[in-house]
Amino acid sequence: MKAVSMNAYQSLAIGQPIERLEAIPPAVDAMVRFEGISKTYPAYRGKPGVNALQNIDFAIPRGSITGVIGRSGAGKSSLVRLINGLEKPSTGRVIVDGSDISALTGRALRLAQRSIGMIFQHFNLLSSRTAADNIALPLEIAGWAKADIKARVTELLALVGIADKHDRYPSELSGGQKQRVGIARALATRPSVLLSDEATSALDPQTTRAILDLLANINRELGVTIVLITHEMSVVRQLAKEVVVLDAGHVVESGHVADIFTHPKHPITQSFLAEVIGDSLPVSLASRIVPGPSAGGHAVIRIEVRGAGAGDTLVARLARELGRDVSLLSARIDEIGGQHVGSLVLGIPLGVSGGADAVTRTLAFLSRHQFPAEHLGYVA
Ligand SMILES: Nc1ncnc2c1ncn2[C@@H]1O[C@H](COP(=O)(O)OP(=O)(O)OP(=O)(O)O)[C@@H](O)[C@H]1O
């Protein structure tokens, strides 16, 4: 007999064909697993069908904060709707906490959905209900007793840092406070997964940081697995430890944030990275670069920096190697997943001879120490 993986809502999934439950392989460390997923929206009223997702196979580790990043139309929302069972896959299955959510319907699906909270870009609060009553809504639907709802709502308001907003209506709250209500509501039924669909896209940078900090605390203290759907690299960089890069319905890269962004392979991943570290030179420098050397000028060398502390002593070591001062013309280094990622632009003095030798020696030194580098030209 095959192993049956039981969890809180599977055991309640009475009425489901038993062989479906039995067919689920045990998921040891995956909270969400996509197995051979494709999603096609059929042609409708003269509009052609859309292959929104194709060949999707990946796992979201239990207890992780995983970013799903992609441009508009990449398939992020389709992916998230498969996790909470709002959409069914065209092929494959989605295993959430050991259950094949794509096979559930009716009451079993509704019970499963209580284990999956969701927060939205525009908060989706009911304007006619106070903050407390918005948070109470999923508990009322789940049939909780009034006294239990009251106690849980008080606890949740404190958890998200707005205990004093109990009786406020959404129109009386700031964007950040509304999102805190949204987070409290999403956590009300103690879900094991929290889906965040562009939840900070409508907030200013400072409020975004505060909400992302709150999500990090929730992950740490409650152990909730968080799936961050976003088109913003800054959100992934600040919060996620794992990342899945989606492009045109395909997963093009996935893994640890630090690994993916220190060695981005796919052009779309590289373009997300460039948004953070930038790949353009300051205008004042770019306008001075010429193709040929001049006596007393500098060769301009751009160096990629990837890895923990990678560039720390580089300039000093290079200067020692060349036996001359090296100028730092521009630097842009960021930290992603504990790794340094960015670029340094150095000016190597050519001396009176106009020394092509200095360029050759610099590039050889950088190659020996495995720093990708590019000779951009010369400045006077
Ligand atoms: N219900 C639907 N019916 C038909 N096509 C759809 C439907 N939902 C999404 N699509 C199409 O599927 C593709 C992926 O859309 P999806 O909303 O999943 O992408 P996204 O990455 O979330 O984009 P955005 O960031 O713009 O929301 C798009 O081409 C979209 O037009």
Image (cartoon, rainbow, N blue to C red):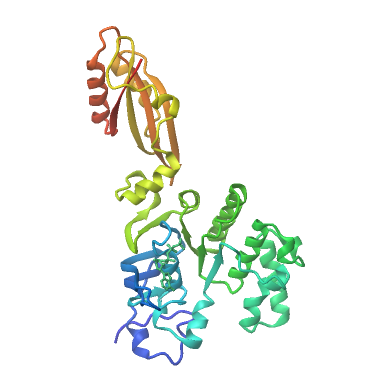
View quadrant of ligand 1: bottom left
Q: Nearer the viewer, residue 353 or 72?
A: 72
Res. 152 in view: no
**Residue at the (71%, 73%) spot, across then down:** 133
x and y percentages locating residue 19 in the rendered image: 33, 88
Whether residue 111 sits left or right of residue 184 in the image: it is left
Q: Compared with residue 64, is residue 124 higher up or lower down, i.e. above or below? A: below
Whether residue 299 sits left or right of residue 308 in the image: it is left
Q: Compared with residue 151, is residue 338 higher up or lower down, i.e. above or below? A: above
Q: Nearer the viewer, residue 307 or 11?
A: 307
Res. 60 in view: yes
Whether residue 344 sits left or right of residue 159 in the image: it is left
Q: Image quadrant of residue 102?
A: bottom left
x and y percentages locating residue 338 in the rendered image: 43, 43
**Residue at the (45%, 68%) spot, across then down:** 80
Q: Disc count in the image?
A: 0
Q: Compared with residue 15, is residue 181 higher up or lower down, i.e. above or below? A: above
- Rendered-image quadrant of the C terminus: top left
Q: Image quadrant of residue 324?
A: top left
x and y percentages locating residue 33 in the rendered image: 37, 70
- The residue positioned farthest toward the top in the image shown: 352
x and y percentages locating residue 161 in the rendered image: 68, 58
- The residue positioned farthest toward the front in the image shown: 46
- Rendered-image quadrant of the N terminus: bottom left
Q: Compared with residue 258, is residue 146 higher up or lower down, i.e. above or below? A: below
